[in-house]
Amino acid sequence: MKVAFIGIGKMGLPMAGNVLRAGHDLTVFNRTASRSDPLRDDGATVATSAAEAVRGAEVLVTMVADGAAVEAQLEGDEGFLAEAPDGLVWLEMSTIGPIAARAFAARAAEAGIQMLDAPVSGSVAVAEAAGLVAMVGGPSDALERACPVLEAMTKAQFHLGETGAGAAMKLGVNVMIASQTVAISEALNLAEAAGIERADAYDVIAAGALASPFVEYKRAAFLDPDGTPPAFALDLMRKDLKLALEQGEAAGLPLFGAGAAADAMTVAAGLEGGDEDLVRVADALRRIAAGTSGDAKN
Ligand SMILES: NC(=O)c1ccc[n+]([C@@H]2O[C@H](COP(=O)([O-])OP(=O)(O)OC[C@H]3O[C@@H](n4cnc5c(N)ncnc54)[C@H](OP(=O)(O)O)[C@@H]3O)[C@@H](O)[C@H]2O)c1
């Protein structure tokens, strides 16, 4: 199929690579052009605007930071709505929450295209292995058409209902990831304070009742945060938890765990840097324990 892919970030790069490897005719666009270089080398066409990328496409994938980034690619002469062909199916795979997803879908419909919210669970290594799990909201016929592209990037696709259902489910999943990150951080710090080696403590966690793919693929980052490139930025998780708390408030649902995790992520972003990985929560808590002048990382 002819596919346009906008947003070649940490996740977008391996996802677009898998679309290409599955044999699709791929055109990519990213705000910072150099991030598309590896895909050009592998045979993708690199466009100079979102509008150019989407010309003639059957499926469009967007994988950008947040709703504001989607907005920035949408409108105007350079935006993809200007050139979107009739019948285009837009897979919006960023984490933007259900309110934004429904608003974008309505604008897409006015332009004659169908949007599916299809955010994913997984991380960079999981994306590289095409092992992501997609949560999809929107019309079945659009999903059927976009399926070959979605399947190239994901190992499972759950169609959960109307537009916004996928985006809503994704926020629930990220509440779990954030809470797990805080829980693992606290467990590791408690173990280390009791004289247990961090690696030994991690082995116990990975073999225990809460063992999970997340615990496995975060092992290197938790054990060696300085030597492991960030995969999921603290600031992105803060954005997701803010969306989840807003969704909870709209539904009248208390989200105590999400609130506590959001506070921990904010403290960690302040002490360690918002571009750093989620696992820096553990470092931030150690830094607090050591006092502001202490070196908490060792
Ligand atoms: N990382 C993970 O483990 C993970 C897992 C599941 C879902 N997600 C979600 O997937 C999405 C992408 O995450 P990521 O980790 O790939 O983030 P990332 O590496 O920070 O990439 C963000 C992408 O968005 C683009 N972007 C940001 N602001 C923009 C703007 N105003 N206009 C145009 N483009 C803009 C960036 O372009 P530039 O290159 O020009 O900055 C880049 O392509 C996020 O919604 C995130 O919450 C992430």
Image (cartoon, helix red, strand yellow):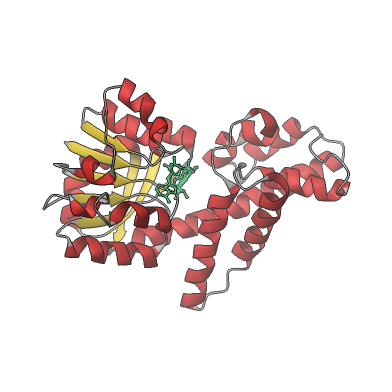
Q: Is residue 224 above or below residue 255?
A: above
Residue 33 visible in image: yes
Residue 251, x across and y down, in percent: 46, 76
Q: Is residue 73 left or right of residue 26?
A: right
Q: Compare residues 202 and 252 and report the one nearer the observer.
A: 252
Q: Residue at 55% x, 35% y: name it.
A: 217
Furthest residue toward bottom: 252
Q: Is residue 7 above or below residue 42?
A: below
Q: Residue 99 appears at what percent x and percent y?
A: 38, 68
Residue at the far left: name it.
86
Q: Quadrant of the C terminus?
A: top right
As drawn, the residue found furthest toward the front would be 77
Q: How many marks?
A: 0
Residue farthest to the top? 41
**Quadrant housing the N terminus:** top left
Residue 35 position by quadrant:
top left
Q: Residue 291: image x %, image y %?
A: 88, 49
Q: Residue at x 16, y 43 (%)?
A: 58
The x, y position of residue 196, in whole percent, is 82, 35
Answer left or right for 33 relative to 108. right
The answer to whether any part of residue 187 appears in the image is no
Looking at the image, residue 251 sits to the left or right of residue 161; the answer is right
Q: Quadrant of ligand 1?
A: top left
Horizontal placement of 218 versus 153: left or right? right
At horizontal 17% and vertical 42% (from top left) the residue drawn is: 57
